[in-house]
Structures are given as structure tokens and as C-alpha cells.
Amino acid sequence: GSIETSRGCPFDCNFCAITSFYGRSYRQKSNDRIIDEMKRLVKLGRSHYYFADDNFGMDIKKHVDLFERILKEKLDVRFFAQMRTDTIGLHPEMVELAARAGLYGALIGFDTYDTDTFHHVAKVGSVELNNKCVEVMRKNKIIIFGSHIYALPSQKKPFDFMKTFWVGRKNSDLFRMPHFSLLPGTKAYG
């Protein structure tokens, strides 16, 4: 099953089309509604979910409550989500709770491992956060579907490409390396 617990994003990453589509609005469903949707899916025989949020886990207090409720309700579920490195790296206790509630994997945008390149994605991120994120995920035995960008404007070829490629592969169970693309409507597009 697929459940959308929130829509939009409050961040302003310059490469991302989400804010150009939704604006910077961010709306969330209540945990009551999310639990109700999960129970309905369980009744239909679905116990494996994709949380289809753009940035799952951003509201730490809300998500801690959600994971505690999944455990309290004894919902025997497994789920996958798309999460940010800062959400994971700065809140390891929430990720540990999420793993106990059923989080088994996440798509994570690591972007790069070059400290001089992070300013081109205008995103809260750093090599240190990338490494902390990997540490937290590995500790909780959560599959890492790592996304790493190449051809950012400040990357010095081929060194930065190779560094991101090899470190990204080491830090990912499933590795993805898309080309930096300027999308219409994004800040980077201009």
C-alpha cells in the first residue's frame, strides 16, 4: 500500500521541483488519520507500505508519536520512505523508534561528498551529516537507497565525480547517481 502523510516541503533547495509545484507550503495529515488508513490497508491484507511523502520524518514530535502508536496498536507493518540526511543524522533516537515500528528502508538524498559543492544544492547538508546518517541507518539495519548527484556546477572533474561515486557506493545498499538537472521552475534554473 501507499500512504501520503504529508504534502509539499518547507525547504528551499535550489534544484528541487517540489517547491515550484506546491510553493513552500507543507501540509500534514493527523496521526489519527494515518493510523486509520494503515488499519484499513491491514484489513485489505496490506502490511507493507510506501510512505509517499517528499520528506518523511521532518516533524520529529509528530513522527515519534506516529511510531509509538504503530507499536502500541501492534500493527505488524513494514514501510519504506524518502528521508533527508539531516532528519536522520540529527535525530537518531527517532530513527531507532521508526525501525522498531517497521521502517526497513529509505531513499536518502546524500547529494555529494565534496564540502565545496553543498552550496550548489542550497540544502542543509554536509559530509559529516552524510556520514552520521549512514552510521544511524547501519546501526538500525535499515536499507539505504542512496541518491548522489554528479555534474553540479562546482564539481571538479573527474576527482569529485569519482569521490562521490566511490564513497556513495560504499554508503549505499542500493546506489543511484543522477546527473544534476536544471528543472524549469526551480531556483537553479534561473
Image (cartoon, helix red, strand yellow):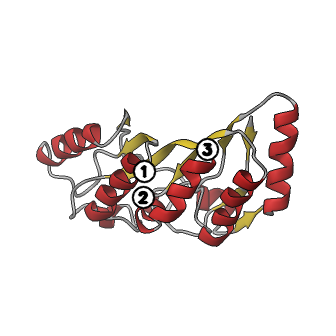
Q: Residues within 10 Å of mark 2 (few under 14, many from 20)?
A: many
Q: Quadrant of residue 118?
A: bottom left
Q: Badge 2 is on which residue?
A: 85
Judged from the image, the secondary structure of the residue bearing numbered disc 3 is loop
Is residue 152 something one can see in this rendering? yes
Name which residue lies at 84% across and 46% down.
37
Q: Nearer the viewer, residue 98 or 60?
A: 98
x then y, percent, for residue 22: 68, 60
Q: Are marks 2 and 1 in contact (CB under 8 Å)?
A: yes
What separation in Å lies between label 3 and label 2 (alpha carbons)?
19 Å
Q: For mark 3, does the 10 Å Cα neighbourhood hold few (<14), some (14 to 19), or many (20 or more) residues? A: many
- Indicate which label's residue lies in the foreground, 3 or 2: 3
User: Could you tell which of marks 2 and 1 lies nearer the N-terminus?
Assistant: 2
Q: Which residue is mark 1?
A: 109
Farthest residue toward the top?
45
Identify whether 101 is placed above or below 32.
above
Q: Residue at x 79, y 53 (%)?
A: 34
Q: Which residue type does callout 1 highlight? A: Gly
